[in-house]
């Protein structure tokens, strides 16, 4: 943009900060446009690749070209020429693992009802832990420091376009390296941040169009792909303690504690308009926790209070109904300190653990389960079913519950279990004893959602098991209804396949039949190809008459009706 002399120096500093990251600038001047010269052509190409489309402010966006583009565009012919076809770059099928004919779910192994099948195994694949991306496309592993950046924490954006990393290395004011946002496909660094505390970690919204990070008295919201501040300014919120994005909308919730005579408040803000759609004032507040339901239909705020004239802490659940007009709020009050609250993934129920051992109660509104040996709740990803688990010090007690009628389906135990993981379909559950928690009896056990044990897999120094996430289905709601309607028909087919896979002999027979079918399909495709190639020769031998189809050459047909006598029968009639 053109600038008067008084503001020219500031503009030069901004431009220099943006473009100097690609290389040393040797020359530069501005007059509403600017020419920059780098020390090497590769640096200029890097600047074009990363700075073209950069949003400088509300009114100005950079358009960046190399200088040789002027000659290229000036020499374009006025006559249209068909552009040269560019070769297709095949990245492979990123969903190949979902096309497994046996519908197996992949972690490091493929899940099987009898025994896990090794899918991929490498020595020193990771040296700390692993992390799946939200849709299961990428698997992140961690390694010791080398010539590359040493990363100790990682997070993916929900859209899988960006990855956020944390490095404990010291960084500088001019070049922040502690927290970096990367473009996954290109590997380009998009933006870096300093990190003084865990609250400074950037958190993406549900579709990856925005991300936010919190510093002292400030909430900064950035937009992608420019990675610039939304409207070029942060939100000044005195005393802000925490924030959370809605899983289904561009709505951010944050809370602020009390300050003298000003009550604490929870605020819901619509973005990018920054409109406050609901503000809830709270009094005598000690702490707040924000819990969204997975579709974003509800927000539950766990509020710990110390009411005047009473001793101890009283907990309220303030439930915001996000889909209703003016966002009404319901209040559920509980005495004591409930230590956990979890929404049902695909529903409106939530579960709470409260009380002290051995009198721990589980509340799944409106049902109460008394005296459970549980310190954790694990909902099935599809809702309805849940597991109440007493992990570590509670010796691995497990209760499988159907919340549709609040029945206890089974009560079992995996001694000293430290972790519980549902598979994405909600059909299976894994409990494990991690080497990180206990140095003996390391193993993982596989269960059905009803609590029936399928497998026991003992592994020395076993550390971690993660199910591979599944992307959202491509089926329409009508298609899902049709499948559910015919579920009994499909179930019979799957049950038959499960029975065949139970024995080694049946598995060998299935593999043999599958191999024979593949051989037949290969032979058939080759025969069809040969038949197609010989069509010209057939036409020559038959005088140009195409006899490949039964209804070919219908114009040359003649219709002829033929009648012939079958039999005769004489029946005498009485007088």
Image: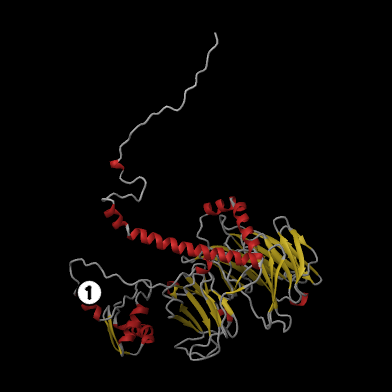
Picture coordinates of residue 119 (x, y %)?
57, 75
Q: Quadrant of residue 139?
A: bottom right
Q: Residue at x 58, y 67 (%)?
A: 104
The quadrant of the image that shows the C terminus is top right
Q: In this picture, is 25 found above or below 337?
A: below
Residue 444 shows in this picture: yes
Q: Position of residue 573 (x, y in %)?
A: 53, 13
Which of the 4 image quarters holds residue 261? bottom right
Q: Is residue 527 left or right of residue 472?
A: left
Percent coordinates x, y for residue 247 in the rendering: 55, 65
Q: Quadrant of the N terminus?
A: bottom left
Taking the image as shown, residue 536 lies to the left or right of residue 286, namely left
Residue sitting at the far top: 575
Image colouring: secondary structure
- For this view, does 237 lie left or right of residue 334? left
Image coordinates of residue 151 in percent, x first then y, are 53, 85
In this picture, residue 358 sits left or right of residue 331: right
Helix, strand, or loop for circle 1?
A: helix
């Amino acid at each position: 943009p053109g600038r008067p002399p008084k503001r020219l120096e500031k503009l030069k500093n901004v431009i220099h900060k943006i473009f100097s990251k690609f290389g040393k600038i040797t020359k530069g001047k501005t007059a509403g446009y600017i020419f920059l010269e780098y020390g090497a052509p590769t640096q200029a190409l890097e600047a074009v690749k990363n700075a073209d489309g950069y949003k400088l402010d509300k009114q100005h966006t950079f358009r960046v070209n190399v200088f040789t583009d002027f000659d290229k565009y000036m020499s374009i012919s006025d006559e249209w020429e068909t552009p040269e076809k560019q070769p297709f770059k095949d990245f492979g099928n990123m969903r190949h693992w979902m096309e497994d004919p046996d519908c197996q779910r992949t972690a490091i192994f493929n899940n099987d009802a009898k025994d896990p099948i090794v899918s991929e195994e490498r020595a020193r694949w990771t040296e700390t832990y692993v992390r799946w991306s939200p849709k299961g496309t990428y698997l992140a592993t961690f390694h010791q420091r080398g010539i590359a950046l040493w990363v100790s924490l990682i997070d993916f954006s929900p859209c899988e376009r960006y990855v956020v990393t944390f490095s404990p290395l010291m960084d500088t004011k001019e070049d922040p390296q502690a927290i970096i946002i990367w473009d996954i496909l290109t590997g380009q660094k998009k933006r870096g941040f300093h990190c003084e505390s865990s609250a400074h970690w950037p958190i993406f919204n549900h579709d990856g169009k925005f991300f936010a990070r919190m510093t002292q008295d400030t909430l900064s919201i950035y937009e992608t792909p420019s990675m610039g501040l939304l409207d070029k300014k942060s939100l000044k919120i005195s005393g802000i303690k925490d924030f959370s994005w809605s899983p289904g909308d561009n709505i951010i919730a944050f809370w602020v504690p009390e300050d003298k005579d000003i009550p604490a408040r929870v605020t819901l803000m619509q973005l990018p308009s920054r409109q406050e759609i609901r503000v809830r004032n709270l009094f005598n507040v000690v702490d707040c926790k924000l819990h969204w339901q997975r579709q974003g239909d509800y927000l539950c705020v766990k509020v710990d209070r110390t009411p005047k004239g009473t001793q101890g802490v009283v907990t309220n659940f303030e439930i915001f109904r996000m889909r209703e007009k003016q966002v009404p709020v319901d209040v559920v009050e509980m005495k004591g300190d409930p230590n956990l609250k979890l929404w049902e993934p695909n529903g409106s129920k939530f579960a709470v653990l409260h009380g002290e051992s051995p009198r721990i109660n589980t509340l799944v509104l409106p049902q109460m389960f008394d005296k459970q040996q549980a310190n954790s709740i694990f909902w099935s990803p599809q809702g309805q079913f849940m597991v109440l688990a007493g992990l570590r010090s509670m010796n691995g007690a497990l209760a499988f519950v159907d919340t549709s009628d609040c029945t206890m389906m089974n009560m079992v135990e995996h001694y000293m279990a430290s972790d519980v993981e549902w598979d994405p379909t909600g059909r299976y559950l894994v409990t494990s004893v991690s080497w990180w928690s206990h140095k003996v009896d390391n193993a993982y056990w596989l269960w059905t959602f009803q609590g029936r044990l399928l497998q026991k897999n003992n592994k020395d120094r076993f550390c971690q098991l993660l199910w591979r996430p599944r992307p959202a289905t491509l089926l329409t709601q009508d298609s899902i209804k049709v499948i559910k309607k015919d579920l009994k028909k499909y179930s019979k087919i799957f049950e038959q396949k499960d029975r065949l896979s139970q024995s080694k002999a049946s598995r060998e027979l299935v593999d043999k039949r599958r191999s024979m079918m593949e051989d037949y399909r290969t032979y058939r495709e080759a025969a069809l190809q040969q038949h197609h190639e010989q069509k010209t020769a057939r036409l020559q031998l038959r005088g140009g008459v195409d006899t490949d189809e039964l209804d070919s050459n219908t114009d040359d047909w003649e219709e002829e009706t033929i009648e012939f006598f079958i039999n005769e029968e004489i029946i005498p009639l009485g007088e």
